[in-house]
Amino acid sequence: MTLPELFDLSLTARHDQPALDWDRPYTFGEIDARASRMAHVLARRGLKAGDRLCVYLPNCLEFIDLFLAATRLGVIFVPVNILYRDREIRHIAGDADPVAFVANETNRDAIPEGPDVWLAEELSREAAAAPETRTVAVHDGDTPAALVYTSGTTGASKGAILTHNNFAVNALNLIACWRVTEADRLLLTLPLFHVHGLGNGLHCWLISGCRMRLTERFEHQKAAGWMLDFQPTLFFGVPTMYVRLLSVEAEAARRIGAGMRLFVSGSAPLPAQTLEDFRALYGHTILERYGMSETLMNISNPYVGERRPGSVGLPLPGVSVRNLDPDGNPAPDGETGELYLKGSNVFGGYWRRPEATEAAFRDGWFRTGDIAVRSPDGYYTLQGRRSDLIISGGFNIYPREIEEFLLDQPGVAEAAVAAQPDPLRGEVPVAYVVPRGEADPQALEAACRTSLASFKVPRAFVLVDQLPRTALGKIQKHLLPPWPPAS
Ligand code: MLC
C-alpha cells in the first residue's frame, strides 16, 4: 500500500469533515483538492518519480500540499530544518541532488548559490489555477517517500531513506496503540521537517481523520492560549515543551488537562521530575516513547497500564528489539546493552552511502547506538549513547560537526564541544578552545551563528591551555572543566 491510498481514508472518505485549522478551518476535501492541484504544478515543472525535492519551509499549508503531492507523484520529499544555515544547506543540496529547493519569500536568502529555488508563494499561485484531477504515479509501498537527514558521527549528515511502508506502519501502530480516532483534536506545534512532526503528527492526523490545529512553531508564551482555545485531546511534544508548560498558571493547566486525552513525549529523555510535576499540574501522566529518524517509532509506554517514569516502555507491535553486550550476546535483564532493531518501520539505508548503510546494520539488525537496560517485566530504560551526541530541545547535535567547523576558524588550534546540562533544553553545547595566538570568543560565536543552526551554536566558548587527552591522544570530554564554572 502507498501513502496516498492510506490518506484517502480521510481525504476521500471524510471529504466534508473538518480536517485542519490553519488561517481558517479546512475540510479533508479541500486538503485533497489542494494536493491534487499542487501535484499538477510539480509535474508541470518536470518532477517525476524518484526525483528529490528539498523543502525548506516552516509549518504551513504549502508544506502539507507539497508533501501530499510528492507522495502521489513518487517524488522523494526532503524536508530541511529551517534553522539550518549555509553550511548545512549546501551539504544537503550536494548530497540529495534535488531538482529544486522550495523556500518562501522570507527565508529564501538563507539558501546559498547553487540549487534552483522555487518560492512557495509562486507554487501556491500556480496551484490555484491548476486542475483538481488526480495525478498518481504507479508505485508501491517500498518506494522511497522521504530522505530525512540525520547527523552522523563523522560530522556530515546522511539522508535516511524512508519508504511509504515505513511511514504507514509507524502511523498505524501509533493510531492503534495510542487509540487515536477521528474524535481526537490534535494540536501540532512540532516542526514538520523532522519525523516527530511528520511521521507521527501529520500521518496520524491524515490516517485517523482527526481534526488538527497546526501552528507555525511552538511558542511557549502562546501554547496555553492555543490549548484553551482549540481544546485539543492530543498533544505530541519534546521535553522542552513540557518544561515550558510547567509555567502555566494552575487553573488554566487544570482546564487544559480536563479536556485532554493524551500527552506524548519523545525525541529526548523526559526527566522523571518533569513527568511528576506535569502530573501534579495537569492531572495527566505523559506517555514517553522512543524513536529515531532511521526507524521512526520503536518503543512506547502503554496507553493502558503503567507509564513508568524514566522508561520508554515496551516494544511496539512488529518491532523486534535486542539488547546486546559488546560481544554481541544478549545483555541479561537489569544490565546495560546496546539496542538493535528490526521491523517494517526500519529504513533500508542511507542515500548513496553503501558503507554507512553497511555499518548501520549487523546481521540485518539496525544498530541504534543507544545504550539501554531492560527490566524483568520488559520495560526499556535508555542510559546514554555509544557515540557523542547532544540533544538540545529535541534537536540532535553531533559535537564533531561543530568541532570541525571551529578548527577551520582563525585562532583555533584545538577544539572540543561537550554537553552541559540545561534545565530547559536538557543539554546545551559548550565549546572548549585551545587558541593559536589570539582567539576571540565573540568572533567564533558570530562565525557559528552565520554558518550553523542556532541550536548548534555553543552556549559558551571557553579558552583553555590544553584539552585533556588519554595517552593515545583521545580527548577525555568528561575531564573538561564544568561550565558555568563552579563559583
Ligand atoms: C526553535 N527555534 C525555532 C524553531 N524552533 N525557530 C523557528 N522555528 C522553529 N520551529 C529557535 C528559536 O528561534 C530560538 O533561537 C531557539 O530555537 C529557542 O527558541 P524558543 O522560542 O526559546 O523556544 P523554546 O521554548 O526553548 O522551545 C524550543 C522548541 C524547539 C521546543 C520549540 O527546541 C523545537 O522545536 N524542538 C523540536 C525538535 C524536534 O522536532 N525534534 C524531533 C527530531 S526527530 P535562538 O537563536 O534565539 O536561540 C527525532 C526522532 C524522535 O528525534 O524520536 O522523535
Image (cartoon, helix red, strand yellow):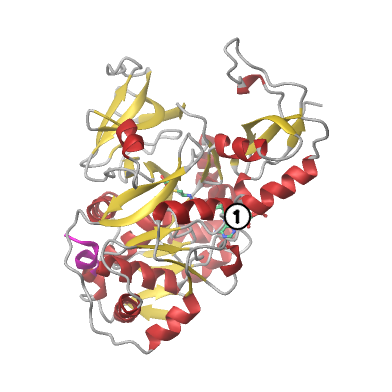
- Residue ID at (18%, 63%): 139
- Hey, which residue is sitting farthest top in the picture? 471
In magenta stretch: residue 6: yes
In magenta stretch: residue 46: no
- Residue ID at (30%, 81%): 33
Q: In the rendering, at what x and y percent does residue 41 appear?
A: 35, 79
Task: Mark yes or no: residue 148 visible.
Answer: yes
Examine the rendered structure and indicate whether residue 135 appears above or below residue 308: below
- Report the span colored magenta: 1-7
Task: List the residue tagged with mark 1.
Answer: 250
The picture quadrant where one finds residue 459 is: top right
Examine the rendered structure and indicate whether residue 209 appears above or below residue 310: below
Q: Is 456 displayed left or right of 388 in the figure? A: right
Examine the rendered structure and indicate whether residue 69 appears above or below residue 470: below
- Hey, which residue is sitting farthest front in the picture? 114
Q: Is 302 or 312 nearer to us in this picture? A: 312
Q: Main secondary structure of the magenta part?
A: helix
Query: Where, quadrant-wise, is the C terminus in this rendering?
Result: top right
The picture quadrant where one finds residue 213 is: bottom left
Residue type at tag 1 = Ala
Q: In the rendering, at what x and y percent does residue 123 appear?
A: 43, 79
Examine the rendered structure and indicate whether residue 337 appears above or below residue 53: above
- Residue ID at (38%, 70%): 66
Q: In the rendering, at what x and y percent does residue 19 appear?
A: 35, 74
